[in-house]
Amino acid sequence: MTRVWKWNRPVTVREVLEDLQQERSIAYTTVMTVLDNLHQKGWVRREAEGRAYRYEAVSTRAAYAAALMNDAWSQSDNPAAALVAFFGMMSEEQRQALRNAVRIVQGPETPEPTEAPDTRRVTGIDTSAAADTTSADTSGDTSTDTAPDTRADTAPENPASAPERDGR
């Protein structure tokens, strides 16, 4: 796959063979068998060209690496801990690449809101419910109930999904 990804175009068994033979001795039938196996597994597609085939990668090397990482992460019994451990293994250059990737995925920064933000998610206090209680109270008691909002939709399920508070 490394050779197919390197050229980023359809390649023949002969091209791969000649490239590999610069480093070591290898038989034509070995290269042909490996490319056929990759085709059967769905990693490459092939088109007939005369009596030979041209093989082309189905996905990019980056997509393959991402799928491996996603598969490993999804099999973890503690995905947040797995991510922390993975990030801890990264070099500074890799962490910078991660920051850049997050910026790309998030898109352009949105302008600051002009209205007061909804703080129920951060504080756990539903101030709009308190205002509704005051206006709906007909007994003359104007006290408000400021108990924390315990509805399930206001608390994140795990710390990794909690919103960042410092804007990063």
Image (cartoon, rainbow, N blue to C red):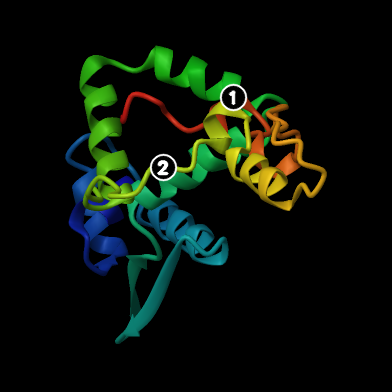
The answer to the question of whether label 1 and label 2 lie on touching residues, with beta carbons closer than 8 A, is no
Q: Which amino acid does label 1 sit on?
A: Pro
Which labelled disc corresponds to residue 60?
Answer: none
Vertical order, 117 against 81 (above or below): below
Q: What element carries label 2?
A: loop
Mark with earlier residue (1, 2): 2
| Identity of the residue drawn at 75% across and 40% down | 151
According to the image, label 1 marks what residue? 159
**Residue 35 versus residue 123: which sits nearer the camera?**
123
Horizontal side, residue 74 vs residue 17: left or right: right
Badge 2: residue crowd in 10 Å (few <14, some 14–19, many ≥20): few
Which labelled disc corresponds to residue 117?
Answer: 2
The image quarter in which residue 29 lies: bottom left
Where is residue 35 shown, x and y percent of the image?
A: 43, 59
Q: Which amino acid does label 2 sit on?
A: Pro
Disc 1 to disc 2, C-alpha distance: 21 Å
| Identity of the residue drawn at 49% across and 65% down | 39
**Residue 53 versus residue 56: which sits nearer the camera?**
56
Where is residue 3 shown, x and y percent of the image?
A: 27, 50
